[in-house]
Image: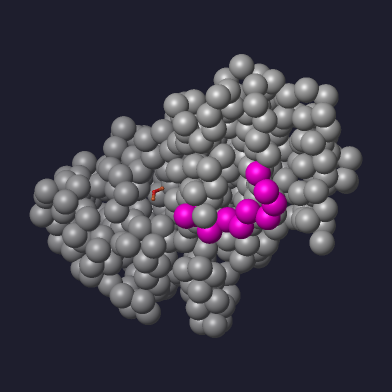
């Protein structure tokens, strides 16, 4: 595969990982695979911005060789220590012995703890510059977007931002640019990526976007480290990030439940009917049969959450327990919720869901609905009204 020139003398030399279906361990389902993007900048000096995940090192090296011999690389910019971007660094350093590595202090420490090799490393800070000849690279520290070491690289002559993980998508495609792919598919993946990785860092992200806007740097192209490059309208993804980071929501409800013998499921379906009849958008997920990554994406712009579980051993069922623990880590803000569930002889699920939602900072806006064994006609009427009441609270 030939390297793709994204600007004059700037080449995408990354790799497409069509088959990866789980990322970050099993915290993220990458149904559309991903890409590991690395960029080669040819000037009087040659810079490689990021590398790729270790198993794809040879693919990157072959692409670089089609443009320039590797020993001519002067600088490797390490925007991020995580191994999907640094994993091939030890291999490539052997092939370009004069290359100096540039990154943050935390990156330097992290690379050493990952690989235990010595490298010629220059620590950079925000506003530090690297002259390549006709072009400069400027560095912007971006701690906790999404690791402490994270950094953005900016090229003013090209109006090109290389923000590593920020603005990325886990989206394997033969196309390299935003205007070459289906827009709904692209934004779906960008939203999924934000919801599952960046959501808890929203306050930091908003501040960083404001900081960059105050710097007044023109941006014509954003080339992230995963997915396609934003060249048609970089503001589209920046504006989407601002909205997500502000926790802006729609009058939409996501219902997530787990059922043991079907009673809690009947309740969930009837609650959803009440919400639909109130005119609200709703999504229903049996957590045991759904992709968690997809549910979280749907929650990103939903104002209301409804959670249900049968009781087992005086507690909620285990899959929804894991789901709620994951959600707690994402720190959603400005959300409201209600809870329901069926029990046999002693409850417990509802109380424990209430506790975890309190810990998560989600406001419970109505009394929980609990039903013994299977719901009868009156119970189902109560479920329907429960859904309607919740929808009305959201619409206020
Ligand atoms: Fe934080 Fe794509 O790695």
Describe residue 233's horizontal placement relative to residue 329 as left or right. right
Q: How many marks?
A: 0
Task: Give the image location of residue 247, x and y in percent.
Answer: 62, 61
Look at the image and name its color scheme.
Answer: one colour
Q: Give 197 or 128, whichever is nearer the viewer.
A: 197
Q: Residue at x 59, y 27 (%)?
A: 343
Q: Give 176 or 310, whichever is nearer the viewer.
A: 310
Q: Residue at x 58, y 32 (%)?
A: 309
Q: Residue at x 71, y 31 (%)?
A: 268
Task: Give the image location of residue 275, x and y in percent.
Answer: 81, 42
Q: Which residue is drawn at 47% across and 68% down?
A: 204
Magenta region, residue range: 359-368
Magenta region, main secondary structure: loop
Q: Give 307 or 126, whichever is nearer the viewer.
A: 307
Residue 269 seen in the current view: yes
Task: Give the image location of residue 71, x and y in percent.
Answer: 22, 51
């Amino acid at each position: 595969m030939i390297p793709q020139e994204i600007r004059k003398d700037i080449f995408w030399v990354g790799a497409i990982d069509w088959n990866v279906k789980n990322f970050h361990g099993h915290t993220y389902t990458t149904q559309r695979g991903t890409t590991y993007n690395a960029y080669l900048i040819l000037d009087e000096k040659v810079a490689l911005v990021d590398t790729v995940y270790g198993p794809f090192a040879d693919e990157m090296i072959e692409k670089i060789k089609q443009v320039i011999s590797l020993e001519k690389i002067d600088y490797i910019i390490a925007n991020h220590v995580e191994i999907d971007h640094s994993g091939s660094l030890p291999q490539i350093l052997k092939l370009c012995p004069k290359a100096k590595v540039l990154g943050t202090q935390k990156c330097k420490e992290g690379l050493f703890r990952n690989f235990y090799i010595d490298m010629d490393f220059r620590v950079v800070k925000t506003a530090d510059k690297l002259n390549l000849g006709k072009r400069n690279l400027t560095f912007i520290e971006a701690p906790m977007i999404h690791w402490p070491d994270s950094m953005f690289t900016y090229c003013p002559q090209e109006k090109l931002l290389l923000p590593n993980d920020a603005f990325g998508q886990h989206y394997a495609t033969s196309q390299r640019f935003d205007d070459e792919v289906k827009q709904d598919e692209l934004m779906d993946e960008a939203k999924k990526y934000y919801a599952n990785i960046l959501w808890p860092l929203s306050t930091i992200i908003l501040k960083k976007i404001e900081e960059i806007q105050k710097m007044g740097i023109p941006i014509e192209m954003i080339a992230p480290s995963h997915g396609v490059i934003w060249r048609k309208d970089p503001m589209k993804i920046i504006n989407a990030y601002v909205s997500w980071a502000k926790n802006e929501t729609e009058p939409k409800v996501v219902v997530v439940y787990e059922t043991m013998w079907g009673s809690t499921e009947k309740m969930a379906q009837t609650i959803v009917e009440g919400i639909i009849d109130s005119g609200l958008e709703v999504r229903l997920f049996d957590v045991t049969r759904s992709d968690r990554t997809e549910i979280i994406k749907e929650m990103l712009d939903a104002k209301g959450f409804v959670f249900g579980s049968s009781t087992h051993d005086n507690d909620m069922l285990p899959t929804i327990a894991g789901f709620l623990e994951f959600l707690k880590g994402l720190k959603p803000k400005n959300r409201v919720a209600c809870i329901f569930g069926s029990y046999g002889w002693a409850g417990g699920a509802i109380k424990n869901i209430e506790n975890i939602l309190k810990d998560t900072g989600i406001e419970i806006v109505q009394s929980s609905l609990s039903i013994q064994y299977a719901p009868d006609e009156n119970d189902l009427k109560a479920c329907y009204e429960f859904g309607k009441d919740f929808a009305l609270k959201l619409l206020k």
